[in-house]
Image (cartoon, rainbow, N blue to C red):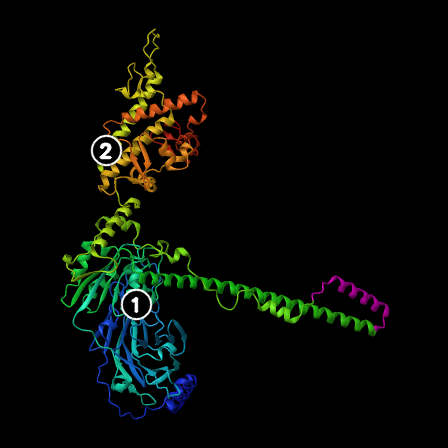
Amino acid sequence: MAPKAEDAKKRKAAKAEDEPAAKRDCKEDDVEKDAPPDSRPVTKAAVSFHGIDTTLNVVPAMQGKVLMALTEGGMQYLVAGARASVGMKAGRYMYEVKIIEALNPVESTQGIHGRTPQPRQLVRLGFSAAGSSLVLGESDECAYFDSEGNFGSGKLKKRTSQNFTRDQVITVILNLDPKSSNAYTMSLFREGARIAEPQPIPQCLRDKPLYPHICFRNVTVQVNMGPQVLRSLPFTCRMLQSAAAADVVESKEPGGIFNVMLPVAVPDEGTFDWLDDWLEENPSWVELSDRKLQQWAASSGLAKPKGGSLDKPSFSYGIGTLEDLSLQKVINSIAATIPRNYVVMEVRGNLVAEERAEVLKRFSLPHFKKSAMVVMGKPLEEFKDRLRAKILKEKQSKSDNEWKLKKAQRDQAKQMARRQKELAEMRRKAEESRKKLLEEALKKAGDESKKEEVKAENAEDAKDEPKAEVKEEEVKQEEDDDGMGEEPPKVELTEEELNVEFRPKAAGSDIAPGALSKSIANFTVPEESEGFDAVEFVWEGEAESKEYLKKWIMEAKQTMRIEDLQPSKYFADKVAQWQKLFQDWQAKQKTFKANPPAKKEKKDTDEPERKVLDIFSIEDVDDMGDGEPLYANFAAEDWALLQMRYEFYLLQECFKKDVDDPDRLDIPEVHISFYFTKYFKKTLNPQAFSLKTVNDLVDLIKDTVIISGDPAVLTANMENVDSPEIFVKFTEECRRDRQRRSDAGDETAKLKYAAPSAPAIRPQAPIQSWPQIRPPAGFKAPGKGAAPVGTWKGGKW
């Protein structure tokens, strides 16, 4: 027994030696001293967690003594945050936290190909200023320790402590006593032992009340604000709950009526810029939007995916529960159960009456006051001033980054040049030393003649080497002065930027084109009759806002393409009829050319030849009277133009029928190719006629359709065409006109048409090329005995 006891003592001693110095010292002495007696009145405010100071996934229990978080629908990937209701403005106080449960939510492997945030279980303990971000580390107004042994102040983080985990009591101390040697620092203890030296808090936090702040993911934590401690420290320190009333400030929980506000604005006209300004003035309001969820995901360790619009950014995280929008469904379900002021930011949804009604239905409880703020028309000067300030700040930041990069590149080049000079100097000194040693060696040998030769060689080398004597001061000045100065240059806004009213669309569109085209016809200005308690018009009045939106919709329709437009059955039937008729005409032309009628003798009359008669007086294009069809002389380019005439006419006619919108009767010029491909499942090819643009192509069939107007649109020259034969007549008239001009010597009248070539068919290998098969020895054909040696041919060997 004795040897075993001795070994145990040795192991214990070795363990103590390996233990960090901070942990050993706390058992004997600590940099913090006992709290002096304080006779001031203790605060009567109960330290708790108000709903407005917790993220939407936090579930407080037992009057804030236990904090849990939702883990369904992608919530397990987001950091939960809770800020206490009592903050410190002086003194030294502490609070305790204990991880009582570590969660491992079940994750479906289906759809997961992205990286989930690590570590899976996470705890951050610290302090933050009122109104700052609820996720520690997202803003500069916070300081914290985390379970991975890091200390963070603002967005900076460094390794300063030991890790902590489940079932360990963790104590956080904030010292705001200016008389203390550890003033304005935070300390961390585990099970009563120090695991981090006092860490200074950011300068920006020293004059503000600081509130205990806890962030966690996939854990349940017990919170102890006092007055009794769970684990004693090497020194006495009061809990926050027993703090002097003069040292703390209480954040009152709002009660009574809460607000739900829907901003309604024209897309890409200051929507999010106005909201950012409004939230800056109203920091207690919570924004419900996809962009806010994406910011939350980014602060939780998820890389922000690219793509999408400002209203609906991409959620392509490679995680199924995030990509299938389960997160949005959970947020919509729980938001109405947590009383607070909300801004429901949906640019497209807030313009549609049906979707506004859905939002009002979710917040139907009597303690919610529902309102809309309409931000349309000419913006206020205050808004434009703020926007110009933002653009200038972004422009200055970009210029500063470019200047710093260029400065770093020049500094690097100077360092390389300086290094090259140093190497050249080292080589020169080495050469001088070599020559000196050589001279001394020759002198010792007494070889005077050799010495003279060496001197001559050295003199010759000195002549060849260029002498670059530069004063040391000049070199230093040249190296130090790079012409860029010590500070980045100040930028200014251009005339165009000074006159801007809204941020350019190049910065990103509010709504994706496809989503906008589907909903634009349903955009309306909200009214109180929809269920709003109030509708406020910010920039212009109600009548002006409605007129502004109506005008914007009409202008947008002229240039917007309808992504989800589908050809109707009427179009499909017309195309089928046309294809049959077109093939019949080509077949009749082929038959006529194969068996032309006998030429009749020309009569001596004044009657003109049939071919010069008025084309449009011909009743039957299949027979002009002598069995000859009107299209008898059509070449490949004429058939192509005939096909194009009918397709463009049908495209314009069916577009008008299928869209069924009096504001969109014609196809915009810029979208002709898009709709042509959508309807006919093929692309327009002006190059087939040696042309460059669709406009040039339409000029060939201007008897049928033209491009005109402002903005330019495709317009048909006729309506309600009963028979496609009219297009044959147009084609023949143009063919004869080109022929007359060509006969007159006009070379420009000839069309340069390249008929599309049919795809080449690869011939199959002939049967004779197959390998000959010799039957195995002893093979017998049925009823024929042994098979002869040879090949199988014609059903026999």
Residue under the image location 30 percent in, 73 percent down: 215
Image height of 394 relative to 199, above or below: above
- Dominant secondary structure, magenta: helix
Residue at label 1? 280
Q: Quadrant of residue 196?
A: bottom left
Work out which quarter of the rendered image holds the N terminus and state it: bottom left
Q: Residues within 10 Å of mark 2 (few under 14, many from 20)?
A: few
* Image side of residue 467 versus residue 455, left or right: left
Q: Can you tell which mark lies on residue 573?
A: 2
Report if residue 52 lies within the magenta region.
Answer: no
Q: Could you classify mark 1 by the number of other residues whose Cα lies within 10 Å: few (under 14), some (14-19), or many (20 or more)?
A: few
At numbered mark 2, what does the secondary structure look like: helix, strand or loop? Answer: helix
Q: Nearer the viewer, residue 759 or 538?
A: 538
Does the stretch in magenta take in 454? Answer: yes
Inspect the image, locate mark 1, and give the three-letter code of the amino acid beneath it. Answer: Glu
Q: Which circle's residue, 1 or 2, is located before the other in the chain?
A: 1
Query: Quick one: quadrant of the C terminus?
Result: top left
- At label 2, the amino acid type is Asp
Q: Nearer the viewer, mark 1 or mark 2?
A: 1
**In this rendering, does residue 763 appear at all?**
no
- Vertical comparison of 9 with 150: above or below: below
Tell me the number on the disc at residue 510: none
Q: Which residues are magenta?
A: 445-468
Q: Is residue 140 visible?
A: yes
